[in-house]
Image (cartoon, rainbow, N blue to C red):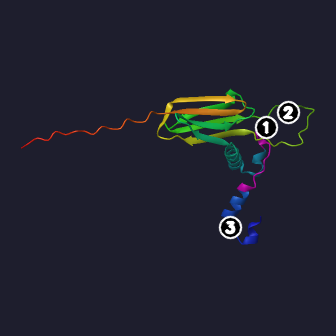
Amino acid sequence: MDAVMFGLETPLMAALQHLLDVPDGDAGAGGDSDNKTGGGATRTYVRDARAMAATPADVKELPGAYAFVVDMPGLGTGDIRVQVEDERVLVVSGERRREEREDDAKYLRMERRMGKFMRKFVLPDNADVDKVAAVCRDGVLTVTVEKLPPPEPKKPKTIEVKVA
């Protein structure tokens, strides 16, 4: 869509259009093709942000825990990191690397996302950040965060009335 057609040719619109037209080049496989136009850092950030947004996740509340299910096809345990930051933020991150290229093989299409990924989830107040477990099975990472037991209801305080 051309911004000129709608009379929206402003520096801000030009910058947004430039960011949205980021090619899906293969800079992550050893080259640095993003820097040809001079906007390497910005383009890298946008590419990584798109990869982060493309990492699907499901969040489930179970009776005694919360479960975060993230698709991680082709990744080993060494490629995935699970952390709790700032006492309440669950961070799942890692990197998916392109496999070694064979000299006699020629890619006709490369659609699988490569590069860094990260997802952050703000944990509820009743999540026990000291009881976090992560299991990766068949390309699906499941992070389980147990719930804290519900607080006991406060008993009413009885105050003795004195006769004056």
Badge 1 is on which residue? Answer: 29
Residue 69 position, x and y percent, is 64, 37
Could you tell me which residue is drawn at 25 percent across and 39 percent down?
A: 157
- Is there CB contact under 8 Å for labels 3 and 1? no
Labels 1 and 2 touching (C-beta < 8 A)? yes
Q: Earlier in the sequence, mark 3 or mark 1?
A: 3
Around disc 1, counting alpha carbons within 10 Å, would you say few (fewer than 14), some (14 to 19), or many (20 or more)? some
Residue 18 drawn in magenta: no
Residue 150 screen position, x and y as percent: 43, 36
Identify the residue under disc 3. 10
Residue 36 vs residue 66, the one in the foreground: 66
Q: Which residue is mark 2?
A: 101
Which circle's residue, 2 or 3, is located before the other in the chain?
3
The residue positioned 66% from the left and 63% from the top of the image is: 12
Q: Which residues are magenta?
A: 19-32
Classify mark 2: residues with Cα within 10 Å, few (<14), some (14-19) or many (20+).
Answer: few
* Residue sitting nearer the eye, 126 or 3: 126
Residue 19 spot, x, y in % from top left: 71, 55
